[in-house]
């Protein structure tokens, strides 16, 4: 069984995917607009080019995404996308990129469990945790 996060956006999914390519070194595997799909009739004409479904590879993890139809978007609450890294400098770089024009909930810093950890909500409303294991730690957070 695989578990894949599915991120919903408020009309800015394509912009978010391009941002994640740069900030995370992610790869957009596919992106399908509403136009030309059976779902095209469920959104206003101006939404034809919005993302119906997309797949993004972040490291070894596939994250899926789409634009929620107008009136159906809800800001994510009670969840975060957690990134686990080995290099504290890379963790800080990624955290800084994700938090730019977003909201820092916990600044990136060493903690009792991690060489570096930070929490933020990016400019697209997606909550993130960036965790860098301490040297010699076993497992992942």
Image (cartoon, rainbow, N blue to C red):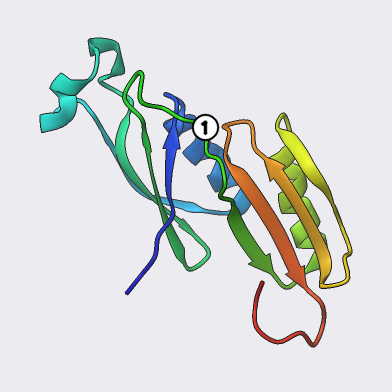
Nearer-the-camera pick, 51 or 30: 51
For this view, does 63 lie left or right of residue 127? left
Residue 26 locus on image (x, y percent)? 52, 53
From the viewer's perspective, tell me whether residue 56 is left or right of residue 130.
left
Q: Measured from the top left, where is residue 72 in percent x and y?
A: 35, 25
> Measuring 31% from the left and 25% from the top, which residue is drawn there?
69
| Number of numbered discs on residues | 1
Mark 1 residue crowding within 10 angstroms, few (<14) / some (14–19) / many (20+): few
Say which residue appears at 75% left-offset and 68% top-offset: 132
In front: 80, or 53? 80
Q: Is residue 131 above or below residue 38?
A: below
Give the x, y percent position of residue 56.
42, 52
130 sits left or right of 21 in the view: right
The percent position of residue 41, horizontal first and vertical second, equals 14, 20
Q: Which residue is mark 1?
A: 75
**Residue occupying image coordinates x 81% and y 70%:** 114
Q: Is residue 129 above or below residue 45?
A: below
Quadrant assignment for the C terminus: bottom right
Please say if 38 is above or below 96: above
Question: SS for tag 1?
Answer: loop
Location of residue 5 by image quarter: bottom left
Pick the quarter of the image with the N terminus.
bottom left
Q: Is residue 54 left or right of residue 106?
A: left
Name the residue rendered at 16%, 29% in the picture: 39
Q: Is residue 7 above or below residue 108?
A: above
Rendered image quadrant of residue 137: bottom right
């Amino acid at each position: 069984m695989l578990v894949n996060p599915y991120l919903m956006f408020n009309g800015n999914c394509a912009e978010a995917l391009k941002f994640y390519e740069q900030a995370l070194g992610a790869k957009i595997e596919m992106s399908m607009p509403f136009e030309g799909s059976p779902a095209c009739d469920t959104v206003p004409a101006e939404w034809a080019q919005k993302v119906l479904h997309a797949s993004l590879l972040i490291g070894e993890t596939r994250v899926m995404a789409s634009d929620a139809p107008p009136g159906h978007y809800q800001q994510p609450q009670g969840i975060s996308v957690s990134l686990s890294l080995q290099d504290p400098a890379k963790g800080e770089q990624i955290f800084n990129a994700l938090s730019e024009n977003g909201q820092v909930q916990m600044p990136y810093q060493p903690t009792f469990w991690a060489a570096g950890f930070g929490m933020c909500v990016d400019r697209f409303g997606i909550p993130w945790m960036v965790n860098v294991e301490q040297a010699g730690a076993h497992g992942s957070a």
